[in-house]
Amino acid sequence: MSLVSDMIANINPFVYTSLRDRISGFVQGQVIEKVATFENIALFETPDLLNLVQLTEKGVQRLPELCLRLLTMLEGIFIFIPAILLSVSLAWWVPLFLFSCVTPAMYVQIKYRKQAWGVERTQASVFQEMNLYACLPYLWNE
């Protein structure tokens, strides 16, 4: 068990860097292609579409975190499976007890993430206005 987790821990930074760069590059390319193929400038005149682009950019910035979480999850699986097998060998109810202890924390985390995303969605237009007002002095000086 320790051998596998040590091996994954040593490989993890290389895989993380490669995965992060590939996924970020691919998604950024898709977003740029989608924005570039708009037939008119309606994207920049419609607040809802502009907010969607803003949220997409935030999502692209979070891709490295997603890659790190995916690799951490993969590493956790290699630790989790032997731990479950060991706990079953002790008593059949030990894994059930462990799952029942973890479930409330998972529920709270999922609920928090949904609320945080809802706040970001509602604040996208406010953030867009802040960026506009921040750029106005530069536009007036030209």
Image (cartoon, helix red, strand yellow):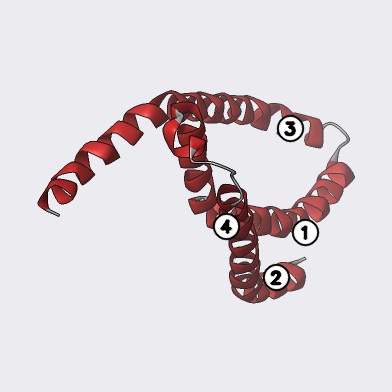
> What's the CA distance linking mark 3 and mark 4?
38 Å
Instruction: Give, as a three-letter code, the residue at label 2.
Output: Ile
- Density class for disc 4 (Cα within 10 Å; few <14, some 14-19, many ≥20) is some
Q: Nearer the viewer, residue 31 or 19?
A: 31
Instruction: Give, as a three-letter code, the residue at label 1.
Output: Phe
Residue drawn at the location 86% of the way across and 38% of the way down? 91
Residue 131 spot, x, y in % from top left: 28, 40
Q: Are marks 2 and 1 in contact (CB under 8 Å)?
A: yes
For disc 4, the marked residue is: 28
Residue 49 spot, x, y in % from top left: 51, 32
Q: Nearer the viewer, residue 7 or 141?
A: 141
Instruction: Give, as a three-letter code, the residue at label 3.
Output: Phe
For disc 2, the marked residue is: 8
For disc 1, the marked residue is: 78
- Density class for disc 1 (Cα within 10 Å; few <14, some 14-19, many ≥20) is some
Q: Earlier in the sequence, mark 4 or mark 2?
A: 2
Q: Is residue 142 left or right of residue 82?
A: left
Q: Nearer the viewer, residue 24 or 29?
A: 29
Q: Is residue 119 left or right of residue 26?
A: left
Instruction: Give, as a three-letter code, the residue at label 4.
Output: Gln
> What's the CA distance linking mark 1 and mark 3?
17 Å
Residue 112 spot, x, y in % from top left: 51, 27
